[in-house]
Image (cartoon, grey):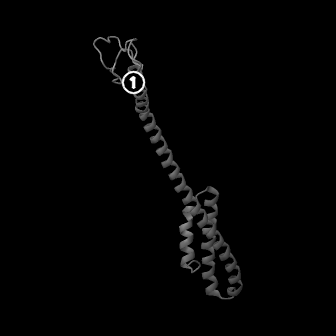
Amino acid sequence: MECPICKTLIYDTCKTQFCPTCHWELVVISADASQSLKAYFDRKLKAFQDSYSVITAIPSLESKIKRLEKENDDLERQIKDRKKDLKDSQIALSIEQKLHDVEIIIRETEQRISDAGTLAAQWDAYQEKLLELKDAYERAQRNGVQSRYLNEIRIFLTEYGLLP
């Protein structure tokens, strides 16, 4: 006999009153049973089949939930990384603008201090340091690691009053 719920083969129905897999009560209804009794067992069979299909679907649904939670965590991590990348890019653009502004200030100031000996020597040191930082930043930018130099450039610009 095959269980009508889970399709398990049951070989000894004389000793077994319930399916060992789904616990359906193994009842044989005679052909001369009343229509109401047959209808009752049909409703009972349908309800048990529906319940059993829901119960057996739970592990699959739990697995899908875990997979979707992992995908959600991965997407949240990617969003966080993209936001950090965006912030770094915005900082880099701001620093590039500041570097451009500083270059303009350097050119204007060079005109004013070209005759002052001590100030010119000091200015040359500042300019040299700025050019070193700019070259390092441009190399880093070409190599895709400009964020390493952003802090050093910020410190330099802050020390010389070029950033608030």
Q: Secondary structure at mark 1?
A: helix
Q: Residue at x 45, y 34 (%)?
A: 60
The answer to whether any part of residue 49 appears in the image is: yes
Q: Residue at x 57, y 75 (%)?
A: 157
Number of labels in the image equals: 1
* 81 up-or-down from 121: above or below: above
Along the line of sight, which residue is nearer the eye, 131 or 43? Answer: 43
Residue furthest left as drawn: 15
Q: Quadrant of the C terminus?
A: bottom right
The amino acid type found where label 1 is placed reads Tyr
Q: Quadrant of residue 11?
A: top left
Along the line of sight, which residue is nearer the eye, 23 or 142? Answer: 23
* 10 up-or-down from 94: above or below: above
Question: Is residue 124 found left or right of 48 in the rendered image?
Answer: right
* 140 up-or-down from 117: above or below: above
Residue 148, given in percent of the width and then of the height, sits at 54, 62
Question: Is residue 155 found left or right of 2 in the rendered image?
Answer: right
Residue 70, given in percent of the width and then of the height, sits at 47, 44
Q: Residue at x 60, y 62 (%)?
A: 89
Q: Residue at x 34, y 17 (%)?
A: 27
Q: Quadrant of the N terminus?
A: top left
Residue furthest bottom as drawn: 116
Question: Is residue 81 found left or right of 43 in the rendered image?
Answer: right
The answer to whether any part of residue 136 appears in the image is: no
Q: Residues within 10 Å of mark 1 (few under 14, many from 20)?
A: few
Residue 143, given in percent of the width and then of the height, sits at 62, 56
Q: Which residue is mark 1?
A: 40
Along the line of sight, which residue is nearer the eye, 43 or 14? Answer: 43
Q: Quadrant of residue 93?
A: bottom right
